[in-house]
Amino acid sequence: MGLTRSSVGKGALGDLPRGERRGERRGVTVALAGNPNVGKSTVFNALTGLHQHTGNWPGKTVERAEGVFSSGGHEYTLVDIPGTYSLLANSKDEEAARDFIASGEADAVIVVCDATALLRNLNLVLQITELTPRVIVCVNLLDEAKSRGIRLDLPLLSSRLGLPVVGVTAKKKRTLSSLVSVLDRLTDGELLPSPPPIKYDEKTERLISETAEKYADTGENVPARWLAIRDITTGVSGDDKARDSIANRLLAVAEDACRDVVTLPEHGGDVRDRRLDRVLTGRITAFPVMLAFLALILWITVAGANYVSDALASFLFSAEAPLNSFFSYIHAPEFVRGALVDGVFRVLAWVVSVMLPPMAIFFPLFTLLEDVGYLPRIAYNLDRPLHRCGACGKQALTTCMGFGCNAAGVVGCRIIDSPRERLLAILTNGFVPCNGRFPTLTAIITMFFAASSLLSSLLLTAVVVGSVLFSLFVTYILSKTVLAGESSSFTLELPPYRKPKVGEILVRSVFDRTLFVLRRAVVAAAPAGLLIWLAANVTVGGESILSICSGFLDPFASAIGLDGVILLAFILGLPANEIVIPIIIMAYTASGTLTGYASLSELHGLLASNGWTPVTAVCMMVFCLMHSPCLTTLFTVKSETKSLRWTLAAALIPTATGIVVCFFINLIFGRLV
């Protein structure tokens, strides 16, 4: 009997075409599973092409991708479940993957494995076969295995697993025809996978049976035996010996299956990788290399974005004249024209022109490091200091994402399994300067401390490293107080170094990250533009609201080395960090609209004439690093934590830290100037 359900096209769905009812599928549903970094997304994209859509799993913030394709008279819905090493842990990714496979929605499961690390990948295959026997093993990256001198006997592996095994090189789409052919045969009932059951020692089997009894009448779709194994593995039931017994048995079965299947060359096949790792993860060289990469990326981002930002700003601001003419043509009141053009449009144009170019440069560079395999090594290098701070090593990855955008960094915290450690990473991600703060930091460094671009980049790197150290310090404090607990260990794969896929890098970085973040920023910046214009143009007693508010804040701001205008600029710049400096210029010049500057020397003269000193500049940089994240990030924190309390904490913790640090800087050095 084939896999196609008899109810497809009838019953609840009737004859409605695909897509008219969200979450319901027609045809054969196939889950695509696999460890991270095995090319699962490449298989998904190659099979489904442009027929894809993304969303979240019901009740979860974990992303889900679905796509459709047809073959052999069948219509397939391919569901790309989150990449995971195991189904037995409790992270959101693993829960989403486990729940979908166990729900019975998937008629078949394709498990993508890495040909260069087959033994490790089989652990997930064995776990999935305990949930469903309808499994196809897709061994990807055959080209990499061949280049390393690794030989594979896939027919032998198939006979031992009792499953169809197909070898592919997913980036060469034509090699996937054999995978689709096997899927057609499985769907038509021509293939009947029969994986042998996994038997544990007598004591462990008895514990599994006893634990499974509590799930006998729960009505869950998941097999009670499998739930018992999960409870023992995650420490809910049983003891360390039982947990080790299950893990060792799975490893032994995988090793037996791989015996004589994988033949390695005499040199091991990864000499190049080991040589690189001696430098990139070495005890002495790891951190200097990381700092060098950071300085290079910041220099490329800042230097490259300057030219693009100027061109984009000229293009966007050139639209002001036609807009003014339009409002004049329709005889709109001056107040309406000013609010919409000088307020909303000008702020939007400023945010887009300043925010888009750095993101368009940084995110591809970040994705490049991820694609070649260096990003996991950064997490490996930072695991020890993060562990000592009570955090998880995966926080290093979310910190790196925060350099591009803190909102993206917060979303990236989903990869952290422990809720406590995930919250630690979310609350401290705001200490990492996003690309919206780089223009301000670079301008201040250049005007007050370093004229050359090279020295400016080096100082900026030092500032960024200082912000990371502060985030570690705050993480440590939180982990010892309100979020006390033991730091967890995690399994980290160091994937082989690979040639980057430029096309995929551009698509992932532009559409998945840059445009996603930009859209949220624009939504937050539009009302901010209106508010800023009103504050600058509505007067009370002949004085603008902007001036009144800055005067009210001035005594407190002076105590922390700033002035009322600077502090108010940070408050009004909450929707987007990019508009802080323009607001300061607008307030100092009393222009009523956001205004740029012709040159840094001109801006330096304006700031100096309004009382700025080197101490003011230092306090400004510190507060730029340590203040509330932008509204886009705060909305993301609220979405991820589902808690207003933790959202407020994410805003107040860095702000309070910045106020304290600036106060002591001004107290110690303010009198010396």
Image (cartoon, rainbow, N blue to C red):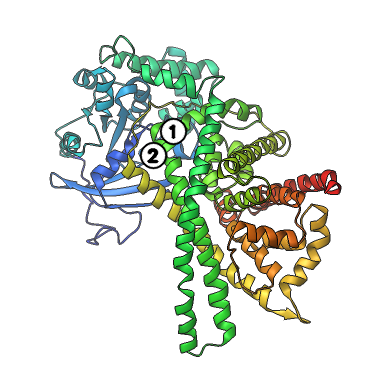
- Element class at badge 2: loop
| Disc ID at residue 221 | 2
Earlier along the polypeptide chain: callout 2 or callout 1?
1
Q: Horizontally, is 441 left or right of 326 in the view? A: right
Question: Residue 216, how many percent across, how many down?
Answer: 44, 33
371 and 305: which one is in front?
305
Q: 635 or 312: which is nearer to us? A: 312
Q: Quadrant of the N terminus?
A: top left
Q: Looking at the rendering, which quadrant does residue 83 occupy?
A: top left
x, y (%) of residue 10?
Answer: 22, 57
Query: Given the current orientation, which residue lies at the most extreme right position?
Result: 671
Three-letter code for the amino acid on which mark 1 is drawn:
Ala
Compute the Cα span from label 2 to label 1. 11 Å
The answer to whether residue 586 is left or right of residue 660 is left
Residue carrying label 1: 216
Asked whether the viewer can see residue 57, the reply is: yes
Q: Within the image, what quadrant is residue 504 found in? A: top left
- Disc nearest the viewer among 2 and 1: 2
Horizontal side, residue 285 vs residue 98: left or right: right
